[in-house]
Amino acid sequence: MQTLSDPHRLHQLVRQWRLAGERVAFVPTMGNLHDGHIELVHQARTRADRVVTSIFVNPMQFGPSEDLDAYPRTLEQDKQRLFEAGCDLLFTPERELLYPAGLSEQTYVEVPGLSDLHCGASRPGHFRGVTTIVCKLFNLVQPDIACFGEKDYQQLAVIRTMVRDLNMPVEVIGIPTVREADGLAMSSRNGYLTDSERATAPELKRTLDITAQALKTLGLETRAELEQQACDRLSQRGFTPDFIRICHGTTLAPAKPGDTSVVILAAAQLGRARLIDNLAVDLTE
């Protein structure tokens, strides 16, 4: 596995692969890799001849009071894991390359509407930072496909919309959430949890499961009540809920009677960790 931070060498290498008729897959990350990230690499490997992973802690998607400085950086361990997973190239761009004029003068890419819902309402500007950096990385890597985890369901929807609206020649593939044995969705921020908080954290997924079962029984006419009950359940177990929303599976607008494909989105604070999760529900079953 090669590690590069120079975009010119990156372009040369990708060009060589393309001239050889090879298909290129891309997995963008912020590092501190866990098994969920490695599954993205494995899935990318099954879909392409070459796999590029990037590690860049993107300051543009962090709010003023969020954990940019404290975000864990584990580059040497990450390199080893990527090598073992069969990654061909690790791209580690410097901040000066991606934001040469600084954040205040940066041209940005934004998906209106969808970026303002749910996590976007709680974290203003977050998805603008996500779409801007992903657009930049797509331009640098020029992949055929890109793999993202479905745990970040809204992020995946926002990126797919950006790619569609800007006619980017990249196939965006969602990979199912990788979970711990007790159901907790894998996340770099799980490392912020204390032992007691870690024991509590799987209640987020259990709450989604309970809500989904109730939704199948009671129907979307009870959406608001089920959302409130889910928030109350999390509060009783020590979380500070941000939201539980039952949404249309594609638009992420509030689900309404007659919708058949919905998703339950959840975000809640537990100690220092902001946990997110989701569960897709097929109401035709």
Image: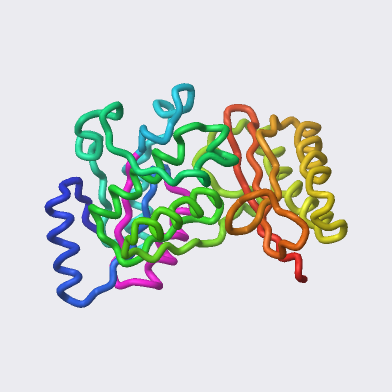
Residue 120's spot in the image, x, y percent?
53, 38
Q: Is residue 31 visible?
A: no
What range is drawn magenta here? 33-56
Q: Which residue is drawn at 65% across and 36% down?
A: 268
In the displayed orientation, state which residue is furthest to the right.
Answer: 218
Q: In this view, does 121 lie above or below 165?
A: above
Q: Residue at x 74, y 30 (%)?
A: 238
Question: Considering depth in this image, is 136 or 221 the residue closer to the camera?
Answer: 221
Q: Residue at x 30, y 29 (%)?
A: 103
Asked which quadrant contains residue 118, the reply is top right
Question: Considering depth in this image, is 18 or 101 the residue closer to the camera?
Answer: 101
Q: Is residue 192 above or below residue 149?
A: above
Which quarter of the image is occupied by the N terminus?
bottom left
Q: Left or right: 204 with respect to 222?
A: left
Residue 113's spot in the image, x, y percent?
51, 44
* 45 in the magenta segment: yes
Residue 279's spot in the image, x, y percent?
67, 55
Q: Residue at x 69, y 30 (%)?
A: 240
* 194 in the magenta segment: no
Q: Left or right: 236 with respect to 247?
A: right
Q: Is residue 249 above or below residue 108?
A: below
Which quarter of the image is occupied by the C terminus?
bottom right
Q: Can residue 137 be seen in this view?
A: yes
Residue 98's spot in the image, x, y percent?
24, 39
